Amino acid sequence: MTISAAELASSGLQFEIDDAVATVTLNRPERRNAMTPGMWRGLAAIGSALPSRIRVVVVRGAGSSFSSGIDLRMFAAEGLPGEEPVPSAADAGFEQWVAGCQAGFLWLRDPSIVSVAAVQGHAIGAGCQLALACDLRVLADDARLCVKEPALGLVPDLTGTKPLVDIVGLPRAIELCLTARTIDAHEAAALRLGELVVAPADLDEAIADLVAALLATDAAASRATKELLAQAAGNTLEQQAAAERRAQAALLRGRLTG
Ligand code: ACO
């Protein structure tokens, strides 16, 4: 699926490529980058058309917040201009519709890239899940994270629950979600939800440094290692050792055959 720059702009996204680095910017700062299904479709389209040379994807938000979550006007009777209404949960296609929204998040875990969220200000609800969808998070020290969905009578359904549990563990995930508590950058980092906390003015530089370090590593080895690491939690030690052997053989054979 391809999407034009104009279509992306109308869905509130900006997309730039610089060599092996792609940057996706949520670009609705006047609404604190509130997200719509159109934006999620735009994210999915970016993911499905990502050039194979891209090694790092940076996800960021324009303005003072990363994202204030779903555009709450979606829930108003009059809906959101230009957006088709959310289908009724009674419709047979409802889960398929959610799957289409989730597609905007899932590609960020692809082994062929490393995704990095640059989080300043609020990351609420769907915004927090977008940060969770990325492999790594760099937090400005004004970052505020909140899985707010349960407080609004919803479950977090934009792929955030698995990374949340994987990172913070089940008891803390239950506590965070079921209280819908907002955590600051330092607590988030202590819970391993951020790899780094920096002053807001230093966020761009911190991202640039991280991206440069990621690009300095051999591309094929990076991809194979990410794939290996991602399966480690689901494997026994023996299975993982076997996966390491297979990955090493495939990597080195690939080099021998050019
Ligand atoms: N949906 C629609 N509009 C929004 C949203 C949103 N999620 N968030 C902010 N806006 C709008 C505000 O209505 C306001 O519009 P206006 O200028 O026309 O009045 C503008 O963006 C700026 O918002 P402020 O509240 O003035 O900005 P501030 O920086 O003080 O606060 C904050 C930012 C904390 C994000 C606040 O706007 C907020 O709490 N927003 C709602 C968050 C929310 O509940 N999201 C849903 C989570 S659940 C889910 O995502 C599934």
Image (cartoon, helix red, strand yellow):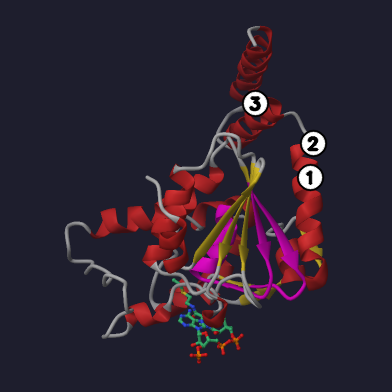
Query: Circle 1 sits on which residue?
Result: 212
Q: Are marks 3 and 1 in contact (CB under 8 Å)?
A: no
Q: Are marks 1 and 2 in contact (CB under 8 Å)?
A: yes
Query: Circle 3 sits on which residue?
Result: 237
Q: Above or below — where is 57 with respect to 5?
A: above
Query: What is the C-alpha distance between the residues marked 2 and 3?
Result: 29 Å
Q: Above or below — where is 149 with respect to 60?
A: below
Q: Are marks 2 and 3 in contact (CB under 8 Å)?
A: no
Asked whether, in this view, residue 151 is left or right of residue 64, the answer is left
Q: Earlier in the sequence, mark 3 or mark 1?
A: 1
Query: What is the C-alpha distance between the residues marked 3 and 1?
Result: 32 Å
From which residue to which does the magenta span run?
A: 115-144
The one nearer the camera, 179 or 123, is: 123
Which residue type carries mark 3? Leu
Which residue is depicted at the point 55% across and 82% down?
A: 30
Residue 94 % position (x, y): 24, 60
Q: Secondary structure at mark 2?
A: loop
| Mark 2 or mark 3, whichever is nearer to me | 2
Query: Circle 2 sits on which residue?
Result: 216
Q: Is mark 3 within 8 Å of ligand 1?
A: no
Residue 76 shows in the view: yes
Residue 208 % position (x, y): 78, 53
Which residue type carries mark 1? Ala
Residue 50 % position (x, y): 51, 42
Q: Residues within 10 Å of mark 1 (few under 14, many from 20)?
A: few
Which residue is depicted at the point 43% across and 63% down?
A: 39
Q: Earlier in the sequence, mark 2 or mark 3?
A: 2
Which residue type carries mark 2? Ala
